[in-house]
């Protein structure tokens, strides 16, 4: 087909003859799928067909070349230079709270300056919480208590843990959590653990147990003939620090051998003597500054560092990521010596700040599950006296200690008989009814080992009266009551026995019988029995 323009024809007319068609005026070809707007009559017309269609061209502007790109300048008002257009979400149903595991309101705004902190429980499960940049360990613990629905708000703490190095320490309540995390190595396995710690401020309650007088001295003899409690009060009031001294074993650099060295801890820092226990300045060697270090307890120190004893602690710089060459591993002879050194490090470094934290911890709200905390429960054991109500004239105070102990034993046995009679069932199934109510109690820890038990009690604080009950691994159908007393963990076997066709539990060869472990615990919370101290603090593990 041939096309020819007939210039002599009148405008807007076209003639077709045979195989020839003549079109007047300029023209263009428009194929299928193309679009063209005809603006000649003011109306917009979409042209598209399966055949060849001819449309007149718009008169070309003489100032614009069709073959050249046109530069379009975007004019924006002032203040909108960083304006970004808002693109609607094409899948809103995937971001709704009902479809998404993460709620929209749980994510902080970009301008709120929040930080995500990951905290582990003692069951190795973790939870992430949003905290502010200045959030302290006390505030984070309070958030976790509310989140985990804990029954009380007392004695909770964040533990800084280095699993590979075996280091751990309890964060002070005033420490900023984000700043602590900033000192961690990005490639390390350091973590925060949420757990109980009953011994955090125990040296304020029992200073003699934590600061033996044989380890306390003062070079200026200012605190001569002062007791441990007076020394602590003097430190908090006037800022005058005593001197903690004693032998510690230290690992020599680049060697596996341990050397016994005499150390001095003063407010100005940690020193060691190069000649025995001499305090002369020429024999003192500066070791570390208290303001630039943190003290950690070492777990499994025999295996990791070849320590001569298990009572090992470590000091390391607080500002830099941990390095093995920066660690100063020290080993004590017993738990009391290690506790004295670690507590003195904290007390000398923070001073009155620790006392302020202790006062705030005592004023924290106390919530007990199922009951309110009465004033009588908060009284100390020293305010309780033994009384005899057997006479007709009324009760009398038992002043003789021997008579009081005898009355305590008789009352315990009578109480057990009454409970056994009240809880006995008349049907035939009573004899074979082993109670399993203890499995739902927070102090029951199943079949954990003896070593794990001691480790758990040490982590939550070696305070008198902390306890747990576990299944015995050596005796079938028996249980073990693990109790902390004087910084040591003692274990008592709870054996089952039968009397009158009924199953009981006992710890004193059948002298005192308990229907179940719950009654055994409740009894020893108010009576010592054969134990050195009453049960006070259950060793609990909270699942996050």
Image (tube, rainbow, N blue to C red):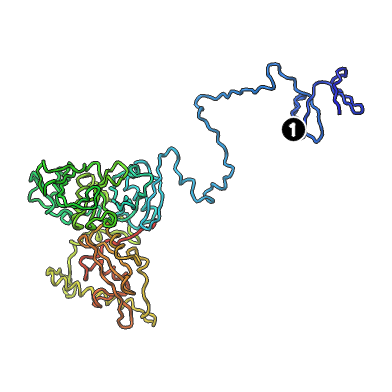
Q: Name the residue under label 1.
A: 34
Residue that appears at 22% across and 73% down: 411
List x then y, in percent, for residue 76: 55, 25
Q: Is 425 placed above or below 146 here?
A: below
User: Could you tell me if residue 493 is visible in this image?
Assistant: yes
**Left or right: where does residue 60 sit relative to residue 474?**
right
Residue that appears at 37% across and 42% down: 132
List x then y, in percent, for residue 452: 31, 62
Quadrant for the C terminus in the image: bottom left
Q: Which of 210 and 499 is in front in this view?
A: 210
Q: In which quarter of the image is residue 285?
A: top left
User: Could you tell me if residue 352 is visible in this image?
Assistant: no
List x then y, in percent, for residue 345: 21, 47
List x then y, in percent, for residue 7: 85, 18
Q: Is 157 placed above or below 488 here?
A: above
Q: Which of 175 and 359 is in front in this view?
A: 175
Q: How many labels does the image show?
A: 1
Q: Nearer the viewer, residue 507 or 4?
A: 4
Quadrant for the N terminus in the image: top right
**Left or right: where does residue 249 sit relative to residue 20?**
left
Q: Nearer the viewer, residue 98 or 57?
A: 57
Q: Is 209 placed above or below 104 here?
A: below
Residue that appears at 57% across and 39% down: 88
- Farthest residue to the right: give it: 18
* Label 1 neighbour load within 10 Å: few <14, some 14-19, many 20+: few
- Farthest residue to the front: give it: 255
User: In what element is the residue under mark 1?
Assistant: loop
């Amino acid at each position: 087909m041939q096309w020819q323009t007939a210039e002599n024809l009148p405008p807007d007319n076209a003639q077709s003859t045979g195989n020839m068609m003549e079109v007047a005026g300029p023209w263009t070809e428009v194929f299928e799928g193309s679009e063209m707007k005809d603006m000649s009559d003011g109306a917009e017309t979409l042209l598209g067909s399966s055949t060849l269609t001819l449309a007149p061209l718009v008169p070309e502007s003489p100032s614009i070349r069709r073959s050249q790109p046109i530069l379009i300048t975007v004019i924006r008002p002032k203040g909108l230079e960083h304006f970004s257009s808002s693109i609607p979400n094409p899948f809103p149903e995937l971001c709704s709270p009902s479809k998404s595991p993460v709620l929209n309101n749980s994510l902080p705004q970009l301008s709120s300056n929040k930080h995500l902190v990951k905290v582990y429980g003692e069951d190795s499960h973790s939870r992430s919480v949003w905290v502010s940049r200045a959030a302290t360990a006390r505030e984070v613990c309070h958030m976790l208590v509310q989140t985990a629905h804990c029954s009380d708000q007392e004695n909770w703490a964040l533990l800084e843990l280095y699993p590979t190095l075996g280091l751990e320490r309890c964060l002070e309540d005033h420490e900023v959590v984000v700043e602590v995390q900033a000192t961690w190595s990005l490639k390390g396995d350091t973590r925060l653990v949420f757990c109980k710690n009953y011994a955090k401020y125990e040296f304020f309650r029992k200073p003699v147990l934590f600061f033996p007088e044989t380890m306390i001295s003062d070079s200026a003899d200012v605190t001569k003939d002062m007791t441990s409690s007076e020394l602590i009060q003097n430190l908090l009031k006037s800022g005058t620090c005593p001197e903690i001294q004693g032998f510690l074993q230290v690992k020599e650099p680049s060697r596996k051998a341990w050397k016994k060295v005499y150390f001095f801890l003063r407010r100005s820092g940690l020193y060691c003597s190069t000649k025995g226990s001499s305090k002369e300045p020429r024999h003192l060697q500066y070791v570390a500054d208290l303001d630039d270090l943190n003290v950690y307890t070492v777990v499994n120190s025999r295996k990791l560092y070849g320590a001569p004893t298990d009572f090992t602690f470590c000091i390391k710089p607080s500002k830099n990521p941990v390095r093995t060459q920066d660690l100063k591993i020290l080993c004590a002879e017993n738990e009391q010596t290690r506790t004295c050194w670690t507590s003195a490090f904290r007390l000398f470094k923070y001073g009155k700040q620790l006392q302020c934290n202790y006062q705030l911890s005592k004023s924290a709200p106390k919530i007990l599950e199922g009951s309110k905390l009465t004033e009588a429960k908060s009284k100390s054991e020293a305010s309780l006296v033994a009384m005899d109500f057997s006479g007709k004239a009324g009760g009398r105070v038992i002043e003789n200690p021997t008579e009081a102990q005898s009355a305590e034993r008789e009352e315990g046995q009578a109480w057990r008989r009454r409970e056994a009679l009240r809880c006995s069932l008349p049907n035939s199934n009573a004899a074979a009814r082993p109670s399993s109510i203890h499995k739902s109690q927070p102090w029951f820890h199943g079949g954990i080992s003896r070593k794990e038990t001691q480790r758990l009690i040490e982590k939550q604080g070696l305070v008198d009266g902390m306890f747990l009950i576990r299944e015995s691994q050596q005796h079938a159908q028996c249980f073990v009551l693990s109790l902390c007393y004087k910084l040591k963990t003692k274990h008592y076997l709870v054996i089952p026995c039968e009397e009158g066709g009924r199953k009981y539990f006992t710890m004193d060869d059948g002298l005192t019988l308990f229907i179940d472990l719950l009654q055994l615990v409740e009894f020893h919370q108010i009576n010592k029995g054969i134990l050195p101290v009453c049960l006070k603090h259950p060793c609990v593990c909270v699942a996050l």
